[in-house]
Image (spheres, grey):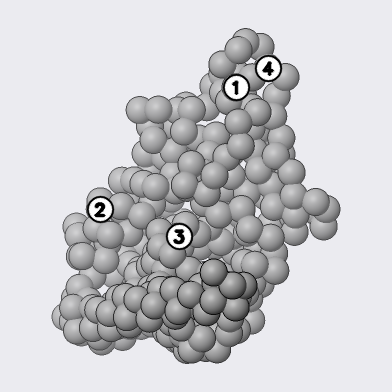
Amino acid sequence: MSYMDRFKQAARKAGTQASMYAQRAQTQLETQARNVQAGFTLPAECQRAASILQGFLADPSNPTSALNSIPKAVLLQAKGLAVFTVVKAGFVWSGKAGSGVVTARLPDGSWSAPSCIMTGGVGFGFQIGADITEFVIVMNSEEAVRSFGMSGNLTIGGNLSTSVGPIGTGAAVSSAIVHAAPMFTYSRSKGLYGGVSLEGTVLMERKDANAQFYGQPIPAMDLLTGKVPAPEAASVMYEVVEAAEQVDETGLPEQAYVPSQQYGQTAQTLYPEPTHADTVAAATEPKTASETGATTTTKTEAETELKT
């Protein structure tokens, strides 16, 4: 077979795969869009948020999981959390839609009633496939909480700066959060997606969903400042966070990944001196995104993914 014949065969195969990915992408995007518009319920979103958080936070029954999770130190100083899922799909042109909830920490340490949020956007770029991404945004300041409560529409990286959050334990994490960005972003992808897209993502308050659940129109700020009691439907989400905040890190090695934007230097993974063979194996084995439960992308990649 000549070189030209092989090239034509490869081109036909690529075209077939592209069509398959595009069809799958369109189906997933349409399904998610229908869920956002019609099937959204706050109790269901709280349940899903709890499941997402479990994948990012340390398991109380397995303290060593804290080495590859959103740090306990980050959770303890968090002023609020936004948890949502985004489905992105396309072939050259792309679209995305998603939904989730945001909650804030009250002065007494408890969590506020959740406010419903949704996302959406279209774009153009070198891309093919479909992707489902889970996001957890940790709000490190009262300003960040107010942005979710007052703006109606929030542009991540526009209205308020954000950075990829650290993971793990130890002094490196403590140093990273001393002068933390207003928000830390954590994400985990479950799908198949390639390329860099130029589209943006907007986080919008779901006023209709809030009104439907709470029985009347209630401003997001009233929900996030505790003027409305936290509903029982959201308790499953609070329990996951509170359990992770109580994980016993005593005796765990200091092992952390600190993204480059924290210090303006090259991102690095820090490990303690190994004391036995298991520690050596754990310290030298590369960590994948699925193992860490959070992406460790560069600042440019994170801003491309979440910038609106």
Q: Report the amino acid beneath label 1.
A: Ala
**What is the CA distance from the residue labelled 1 to the residue labelled 3?**
26 Å
Please identify the residue farthest to the front as the structure is shown: 1
The residue positioned 20% from the left and 60% from the top of the image is 233
Q: Residues within 10 Å of mark 4 (few under 14, many from 20)?
A: some
User: Quarter of the image holding residue 47?
Assistant: bottom left
The residue identified by callout 4 is 274
Could you tell me if the residues under marks 4 and 1 are in contact, i.e. CB atoms within 8 Å? Answer: no
Read off the residue under disc 2. Answer: 235
Residue 131: x and y, percent? Answer: 42, 69
Q: Amino acid at mark 4?
A: Pro
Amino acid at pointer 2: Ser
Q: Are marks 3 and 2 in contact (CB under 8 Å)?
A: no
Residue, disc 3: 189
Please report whichever mark, 2 or 1, sits nearer to the chain's N-terminal start.
2
User: Mark 4 near mark 3, Cβ–Cβ under 8 Å?
Assistant: no
Q: Residues within 10 Å of mark 1 (few under 14, many from 20)?
A: few
Neighbour class for label 2 at 10 Å: few (<14), some, many (≥20)? some
Q: Quadrant of the N terminus?
A: bottom right
Local secondary structure at mark 3: strand
Mark 2 vs mark 1, CA separation in Å: 38 Å
Q: Residue at x 61, y 37 (%)?
A: 286
Q: Which mark is residue 281?
A: 1
Type of residue at label 3? Ser
Q: Nearer the viewer, residue 6 or 237?
A: 6
27 relative to 201 in the view: left or right: left
Earlier sequence position, callout 3 versus callout 2: 3
Classify 198 as above or below 63: below
